[in-house]
Image (spheres, rainbow, N blue to C red):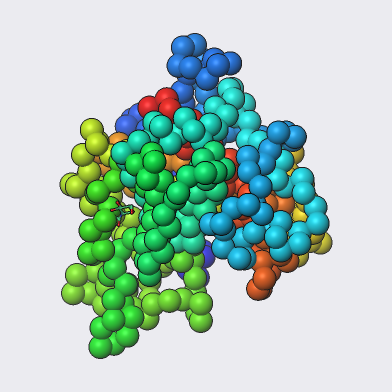
Amino acid sequence: MSILRSHGLYILALVLCHILTFLPLHCSFPVKTHTLNNTPSGKLQSQEKCDLFQGSWVFDNSFPLYDALDCPFIDAGLNCLKNGRPDKDYLKYRWKPDGCDLIRFDGQDFLKRFSGKRIMFVGDSLSSNQWQSLACMLQAAAPSSNYILDSGKALTNLSFPEYGVSVMFLKNGFLVDLVFEEVGKVLKLDSISRSGLWNENDVLIFNSYHWWMHTGKSQTWDYFRVGDQLSKDMDHMEAFKIALTTWAKWVDSNIDPAKTRVFFQGISAVHYHGADWSEPSVRDCSGQTKPLQGSKYPGNRYPGEAIVKSVLTSMTKPVYLLDIALLTQLRKDGHPSNYALGPRDCSHWCVAGVPDACNQLLNTILVQM
Ligand SMILES: *[C@@H]1O[C@H](CO)[C@@H](O)[C@H](O)[C@H]1NC(C)=O
C-alpha cells in the first residue's frame, strides 16, 4: 500500500512537471547549476554546457587514487581490499560525464584551497562512506601530516593542523529529531534541534534517505509527530518530504551563502534485485565485478529523487544537488557485497571505490563555483 502511494506521488510529480514545463522556476530540475562550462584543462571558458551527472564509467588504470591498505579511516566493513575481495577492477573506474571531464583530484591543492576551513558531511552511514573516502584521498596527498582524528559518539573530526583544514562527519540519519517520549521513539518531522554544529562550516554536505525506507522490524522509530499530531504510521515518502522541508527551512533561515556552500548528497543506489539491471536470475550484488556499460539504468528511478528535487527547487538559498543516483545505479560492482565482514552489503560502497568519484565530483564543483 505504501509503495503504491509513494509511486502515485512520484507519478503525480512527473505529470505536474510536464504540465508545468512552461514555468521554468518550478520544474527546471537541475536545481542549481548542474551544468558548467569546461575545456580540456578544466577551466571555465568554453560555452559548452556539461551535465556532470549524465555520463558513464570508463576503465582507467591510473585509479584508485590511494591504497586502501594504507588508509587508517576506513570502517572494517568497507575496506574490501583488506577483507580479501579478489577482483580489483571496481577500483579502476572513472566517472566520465558525457560532455566534459572531471578535474583530476589533487589533494595538496584541495588542502591549500581549504586552508582555515571546515567541511562537514551530515547524514547517515552513506555520508560516513563519503567522509571516509575524502579522508583517505586527503591523507594520501599529505602522508606525513600529523593529522588529528577525534571520534566522538556523533561527530568524527579529522583535521590536518599544518593546513588548518577539518573534514568532519556528523551522524544524523534523519536530519530531523528522533526523541524518546512516553509512547516510544518519536520522529518529529517538523523539528530540528541538533543543528548546533551545522552552521559553523564552510562546506556542508547533507544526506538523508535510506532510513526512511525502513519498515517493520528494521524501522528505528515507533511514531511520527508533526506538531500535536502523533501518528502510528504514514506514508514514509510523505514523512520524508515533510522532514526535508523542515531541513530546507532551516537552511533558508540559517545559512549565509557568502560563507557556506551547501550540498545535498542525492540518493545512493542499492543492488538487491538483479531484475533492476536486467539480470533477473541474479539475486543481488554478489559476484558483480563490472559496472553497467553506458549511461542508462534499466531499473526505476527512486521515489525519493523527485521529492529531493522538488524540495530543493522551492528553497531560497542555493543548495547544490550532488545527483549521484544514476552514477551509483550503474555500479552494481561497487558494494562490499560478501566482503563486508557481516551480512552481505549491497548498499554501502567499498573504499576505495565509488565514493572517490563522488568526491571528485564534489571537488570539480567546488573548484568551479
Ligand atoms: C575539530 O578538530 C580541530 C583540531 O583539533 C578543532 O580545532 C575543531 O574545533 C574541531 N571541530 C569541532 C567541531 O569540534
Q: Is residue 129 above or below residue 318?
A: below
Check the image and name the residue furthest to the top. Answer: 46
Q: Residue at x 65, y 73 (%)?
A: 342
283 lies left or right of 119: right
Q: Residue at x 25, y 83 (%)?
A: 181
118 lies left or right of 89: left
Q: Quadrant of ligand 1?
A: bottom left
Q: What is the quadrant of residue 223 in the picture?
A: bottom left
Instruction: Report x, y in % for residue 165.
Output: 37, 43
Q: Residue at x 39, y 61 (%)?
A: 150
76 lies left or right of 204: right
Q: Nearer the viewer, residue 60 or 140?
A: 140
Q: Is residue 325 above or below residue 237?
A: above
Q: Nearer the viewer, residue 308 or 16?
A: 308
Q: What is the quadrant of residue 319 in the picture?
A: top left
- Which quadrant holds the C terminus? top left
Is residue 297 in sight in this rendering? no
Instruction: Report x, y in % for residue 137.
Output: 55, 43
Instruction: Report x, y in % for residue 203.
Output: 34, 42
